[in-house]
């Protein structure tokens, strides 16, 4: 699983039949500190997230498992919303206070 920030929605007037009624999001992969990590990609979103939200996603064959039809042509799928991130360094600092 990977972290990403949703930067926008992709609107496609023509889609493969298995992707009809599915939301496509433009996501920017990020590291645990929220810094961009790589190039933006398109991911299918069955959760209904919006721009600016942090999510985690999966890629490859497993990405289609986020949909009812697991045979859809999908390379990336959003599987959850991230509410907060606490790194090990932050936890160690909090424990020492």
Image (tube, rainbow, N blue to C red):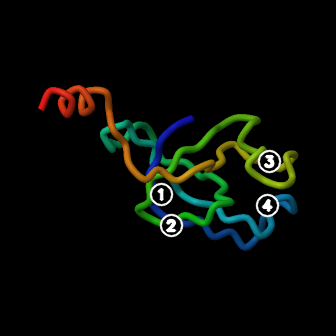
Circles 3 and 4 in contact, beta carbons < 8 Å: yes
The tally of labels here is 4
Element type at mark 4: helix
Gap between marks 4 and 2 measured at Cα: 19 Å
* Residue at left offset 70%, top offset 35%: 60
Quadrant location of the N terminus in the rendered image: top right
Circles 2 and 1 in contact, beta carbons < 8 Å: yes
Q: Residue furthest bottom?
A: 13
Element type at mark 1: strand
Q: Which residue is mark 4?
A: 19
- Of the residues tagged 1 and 3, which is closer to the observer? 1
Gap between marks 1 and 4 measured at Cα: 19 Å
- Nearer to me, 60 or 12: 60
- Nearer to me, 19 or 94: 94
Q: Which residue is mark 3?
A: 73
Q: Between disc 3 and disc 2, whose residue precedes? A: 2
Instruction: Bin the neighbour count of mark 2 within 10 Å (Cα to Cα): few under 14, some 14-19, many 20 and up.
Output: some
Which of the labelled discs sits on residue 50, or is there none?
2
Q: Between disc 1 and disc 3, whose residue precedes? A: 1
Circles 1 and 4 in contact, beta carbons < 8 Å: no
Locate residue 47 relative to residue 19 in the image: left or right: left
Which of the labelled discs sits on residue 6, or is there none?
1
């Amino acid at each position: 699983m990977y972290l990403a920030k949703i930067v926008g929605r992709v609107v496609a007037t023509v889609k493969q039949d298995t992707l009809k009624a599915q939301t496509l999001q433009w996501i920017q992969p990020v590291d645990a500190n929220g810094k961009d990590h790589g190039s933006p990609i398109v991911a299918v979103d069955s959760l209904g997230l919006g721009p600016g939200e942090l999510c985690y996603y999966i890629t490859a064959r497993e990405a289609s498992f986020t949909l009812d039809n697991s045979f859809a042509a999908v390379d990336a799928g959003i599987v959850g919303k991230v509410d907060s991130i606490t790194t090990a360094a932050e936890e160690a600092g909090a424990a020492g206070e």
